[in-house]
Image: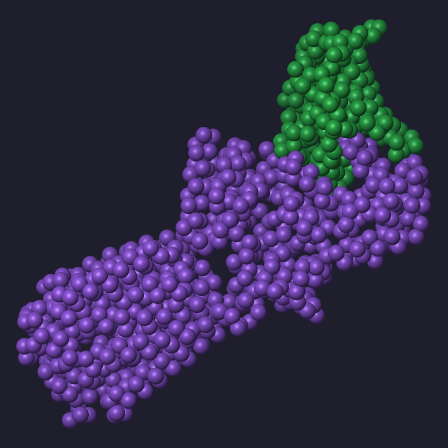
Chain colours: A purple, B green
Amino acid sequence: MSDAGVRGLTLALLAAVAVYSFARFEVTNSITHFFPSGGEAELVELSLELVDSRLSRRMVLTVGQGSERFRAAAALADRLRSHPEVEWIEAGLHDDALRGFYDVYFDRAIYLTSDTPEVEIPKLFEPSALEQRARELRASLAGPTSILVARAAPADPLGLFERVLERTRDAQALPTAGDGVFASADGAYAIILVGLRSSPFESERQAGLLRDIEAEFAEIAAASGGDLELGMSGVNRIAVATEQTVRSDLNFISAVSVAAVCALFLLVFRSLRHLAIAVLAPVAGFAAAIAVALSFGGPVHSITLGFGFVLIGVAIDYPIHVMNHHALAPVAGSPRETVGRIRGSLLLSGLTTTLAFAALALSDFPGLGEMGTFAAVGVPVALGVAMFSVPAFLRSTPDPTRVQRALSVGAVGLIRWLEARVAVAVALVLALMVIAAAGLPRLHWEDDPGSLTMADPALLEEDERVRRRMAYVDGGRFVVALASEAEAALALNDEIYQRLAAAVAAGHLDGVHSLHSFLWSQSLQRANLAAFSAVPQLTEKIDRAFSAVGFRPGAFGRFAEAVAQPTVAPLSPRDLVESPLARVLDSLVELDERVAAVTYLRGVRSSEGVEAALDGLPGAQYVDQRSVIAAVYQGYRRSTTRMVALGCAIVFCVLQLRYRSVTRGLLAFLPSALVALATFGLFGLLGIAVNVVSAISLLVVLGMGVDYGIFTVDCSRDFERLGPTMSSLLVSCLTTLFVFGALALSAQPVLRSIGMTTGVGILFALALSPAVSVLARRIRA
Amino acid sequence: MSRARATLQLLLVLCLAGESRAADEESAAAESGIEPLMKRFAANRGVRARFREARHLALLTDPIESAGVLYFAPPDHLARHTTWPGSARIVVRGTQLAFQDETGHQTLDLGASEVARHFVSDLAVLLRGDLPGLRARYRVAFRAEGQGWVLDLEPRAPVVRRLVAWMRVEGRGSVLTRLETRETNGDTTVLSFEQVETGLDFSAAERERIFSLDERSSGEREK
């Protein structure tokens, strides 16, 4: 095929892949992407499922300060109710809600009287208890609600409905204020609860909703004088903000990288055309990798996109070698002849880098696996373009610039200088060994998953502030009742509630937010009814006690009838679905083949105390999401470190097979393995914490370092290749540094870790390359 | 305190408990003379009266009796300070309601519930001489009787009609003397007024003392 044909085919394929990727492009920020995939501890699985459940699809809005806050909140709630991304809104208790509450609970109060019906219900019928209740009822008949109490009392002389009201109101802990809107405990803020229709991690939809909320509020606030303040809390807000940070980081990194790399190419090649040719290979690899990821893996994680820039840093080395070797070729020839001369080095570099990254693709983290696949696809494609397409874009006649010549000559001069001072080369190697040996024992691993992503602190503060204005629970700590079906989960939840109540009394935590406040298991409800039915002479006892304080005998016949022949069945989840209390069922989560009743905890002071309270309850699990995930990350960090070691071993074996010499294979391996260890050693000495992503980034260092080693060792046999090779390595290293250097400026810790680890590693690898070259030549000699 | 809160919540809930199926027919009862009466009420400004209440409930063998002082300051401040047999205090200010007795104190905003608002503001509507407001809530029948007058009120709101059959207000001149409420279940409440003072302008300090929604100590309540 002619060069023109190759150029046309390359550009056409690239355009087609780009259009395909653009059409299917979808990005995600879900933290679940960095959870292990299946086969792991049940708690992690559970956390994973709960993160994607309806429980996380909520927002809290508060309107504060202004005197019009309640009216403004009511207006905002009304406007948002019809928003396509809003599934439900709860802004207060209104007539319909109260009516629904009465319908659900009044006739069922006999089912929902006591957690310990066998003990407590007989006590209600002891003479002294009945006498006290009769006096209380009589007193309330003298009060302002007499007209209503008198109607409720015949069916509920014992005040059972009031008990239910007390329990549910304490659980809701949201009083109402002006216009019936929910208010914070101090009345300073109106509160609106918003149910989200989509996952909070669908950032595009959530960004639209957040924009609309702010716009609607701005209108309302302006109309009411403008002294109102909107507060928002929700996972969606953090996710959207994180994505915006990542996007803006990527824009910034792209701008800085492009500017620096353009300047470098103008300086070295005196031509941006060479940059365009060089970029062709990594861009093709990037586009192909995105296309594959979108075709088989769904949305691409934003962190994987950042990793794509790493890929550019790796893959741009190949065309740089081709262009620089062609320009500095000792004998004039076509670009394809140049590729032919360095084909072995290029192929071996591509193979080792791909193998190093392929280990990542086997990771149990979907996010890391995606990165591995991304690179394992992108690197070979980029190499193929560098070897097949790039020569078609180059001029046949070599025309090196002065800078290229100077770099080449300088590199040769440096090698000659080092050859005369082998001790310096050895000292350099030893220095890296010392850094590794001294620093690695001090290395601090950060396994907190929160350290991988960073949201705007102001946003997190607002989130915390808003959540404190209402029933504040720690969303990351909860107790789960796990069972095969709902009734069993509810029965377990009943037991958990009692145990946790004891733990609250013991001071292990401040309180709980439990489904038990609204819904009990059928078995406990029937036990309540049975306990009432078992009371001997129930009617007579009531009559005797109540008559003594002036009630007519037989006035409470309806209660006795309800106990003997209930008019309604015990309360079931189905009864709540259509009621104003349907939201409480969000705590009853259907998982794969299981049902979980989730109890959120408030003010946990002793995790051990909570765990001890649940001792001996099969299916009851205390989940501290942060420590669970930290433990998982720690496990995967160790696993990743082992993968890095495995990657090293594979690369070493490949090099041994290629060179069939232990020493030369070792020298080619040195810039990767030693550099990887020295990089972490330096971080240990500087007190820079590393994480699982740093460990992954070491694979990048390995992949690129081994390229440097291969080219350096290969050129040691051919002195004429020494200059072009070493100057190519310098240009490659600078290109990579410009890309990674900008990545290290990212606000996202995960991107920063990648940038710092790879940046430092590549610098070390470049510094070590001349020493490796000298040692290789000395051994060869 | 928790008991008082629960009771108030019960009030709200039970207000909504029923549905009326009765037709809402326009009253053809005579209203002649009511306009001058309501104008006199409107001119009354502030009102203070001692009251005695007797509640005859089907549940009880004997009536429940109480006594105290009722205060009204237009347009919507109403306070009922019970002094016998126990001490209790109910204050209504617009849609705000405060209730305090031996079991505790609670304030409540009735803004969310049209029904509850209706319930607590009826007497204020009458005392401030708001004839359109009264007609919106009740079918009204007025008649003169001897030296005085009688006002029969039949609730219009379905949910109120389910609880209250009718109310009868009796008075002389611009002074209320008796208010009888007959509930649909036969229970009856009779409020008798004595020492009725009208045309009062409560000072700021008096307003604060009488109509405060805040919790008061028992000493303050005795004043």
Q: Quadrant of the C terminus of chain A?
A: bottom left
Q: Look at 28% across and 86% down and name the residue there.
A: A655
Give how far across and how far down residue A248 sits, in percent.
32, 54
The quarter of the picture where residue A601 lies is: bottom right
Does residue A322 appear anywhere in the picture? yes
Q: In x, y percent, where is residue A596?
A: 62, 61
B179 relative to A679 in the view: left or right: right
The residue drawn where x is 58% and y is 54% is A473
Instruction: Farthest residue to the front: give it.
Output: A1
Which of the two residues, A610 or A376, is positioned nearer the viewer here? A376
Task: Identify which residue, A543 or A345, lies in the foreground.
Answer: A345
Q: Which is nearer the eye, A360 or B148? A: A360
Residue B39, quarter of picture:
top right
Q: Residue at x 59, y 33 (%)?
A: A179
Please state which of residues A434 and A475 is positioned toward the viewer in this rendering: A475
Say if A199 sits above or below A348 in the image. above
**Residue located 91% across and 30% down the image:** B62
Rendered-image quadrant of the N terminus of chain A = bottom left
Q: Position of residue A437 (x, y in %)?
A: 35, 82
Against A257, residue B5 (above or below) is above
In this rendering, the count of numbered labels is 0
- Tell me if residue A51 comes above or below residue A133 in the rendering: below
Q: Is residue A682 visible?
A: no
* Residue B206 place in picture, x, y as percent: 68, 23
Residue B97, compared with residue A467, is above or below; it is above
Left or right: A47, with A770 as reference point: right
